């Protein structure tokens, strides 16, 4: 499915990425983008008619300054992925602290994707890099995509290299035993995790 994201940074869909068991991510199932506040009215109308959910991961104060053009639309969900006050210093080479300090909100973001009606889902933050990158990595991991491919997709984002995402996924395994045990700690049960797997494959 083609969508025009003119005016939006780092927009792409994840369809076609291969999975470790020989499958692949379904074309058009998951899109990642930056903020939508510069989208033209016609684009907003076309996207709103084509997707089943737009998940806005930004803080409330970001939305106040740059409101989503989808606000009030049935597809729109505001699901801030980071706590209102960060109690850690984000390092330059890993998103490990993001995983460790925002379990409840990360779980809510994953569930917002899992529980969306059938159809394409769009996830975004401000730049479409950090919060979006971590959420997409968790979703792709659930679907069975290899870490190197997840990191390679992350590196397609403006200003990114694969190593921070590889470090993040290594932390996920070393501290939590993988994506499934981690998401259980966020309140995302096995059934919901399976829903992500099925909608993306």
Image (cartoon, rainbow, N blue to C red):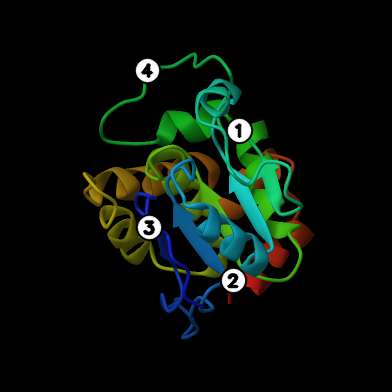
Residue under pointer 1: 80
Question: Reading the chain from its start, which is encountered first: label 1 or label 3?
Answer: 3
Residue at (57%, 71%) from the top-left corner?
Answer: 29
CB contact under 8 Å: marks 4 and 2: no
- Give coordinates of residue 80: x percent, y percent: 61, 33
Label 3 to label 4, Cα distance in Å? 33 Å
- Give coordinates of residue 182: x percent, y percent: 60, 44
Dot 1 falls on a residue whose secondary structure is: loop
- Which corner quadrant holds the C terminus? bottom right
Residue under pointer 3: 6
Label 4 to label 1, Cα distance in Å? 18 Å
Question: Reading the chain from its start, which is encountered first: label 1 or label 2?
Answer: 1
Numbered circle sitting on residue 152: none
Residue under pointer 4: 89
- Give coordinates of residue 171: x percent, y percent: 41, 41
Q: Quadrant of residue 90?
A: top left
Q: Residues within 10 Å of mark 2 (few under 14, many from 20)?
A: many
Considering only vertical position in the picture, is 84 above or below 149? above
Q: Nearer the viewer, mark 3 or mark 2?
A: 3
Residue at (76%, 64%) from the top-left corner?
Answer: 117
Question: Reading the chain from its start, which is encountered first: label 3 or label 2?
Answer: 3
Question: Reading the chain from its start, which is encountered first: label 3 or label 4?
Answer: 3
CB contact under 8 Å: marks 1 and 2: no
Question: Reading the chain from its start, which is encountered first: label 4 or label 2?
Answer: 4
Q: Give the side of residue 37 with respect to residue 7, left or right.
A: right
Q: Give the side of residue 111 with respect to residue 174, left or right.
A: right
**Of residues 185 and 27, the one drawn nearer to the viewer in this rendering:** 27
Residue at (46%, 86%) from the top-left corner?
Answer: 22
CB contact under 8 Å: marks 4 and 1: no
Label 3 to label 2, Cα distance in Å? 25 Å
**Of residues 142 and 35, the one drawn nearer to the viewer in this rendering:** 35
């Amino acid at each position: 499915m083609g969508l025009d994201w003119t005016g939006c940074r780092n927009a792409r869909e994840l369809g076609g990425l291969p999975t470790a068991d020989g499958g692949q991510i379904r074309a058009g199932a998951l899109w990642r983008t930056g903020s939508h506040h510069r989208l033209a009215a016609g684009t907003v109308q076309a996207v709103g008619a084509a997707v089943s959910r737009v998940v806005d991961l930004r803080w409330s104060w970001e939305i106040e300054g740059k409101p989503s053009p989808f606000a009030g639309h049935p597809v729109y969900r505001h699901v801030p992925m980071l706590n209102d006050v960060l109690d850690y210093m984000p390092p330059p080479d890993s998103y490990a602290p993001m995983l460790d300090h925002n379990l409840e909100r990360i779980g809510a973001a994953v569930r917002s994707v899992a529980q969306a009606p059938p159809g394409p889902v769009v996830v975004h933050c401000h730049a479409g890099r950090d919060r979006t990158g971590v959420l997409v990595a968790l979703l792709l991991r659930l679907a069975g995509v290899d870490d190197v491919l997840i990191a390679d997709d992350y590196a397609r984002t403006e200003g990114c290299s694969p190593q921070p995402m590889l470090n993040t996924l290594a932390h996920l395994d070393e501290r939590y035993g993988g994506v499934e045990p981690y998401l259980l700690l966020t309140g995302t049960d096995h059934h919901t995790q399976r829903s992500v797997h099925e909608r993306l494959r």
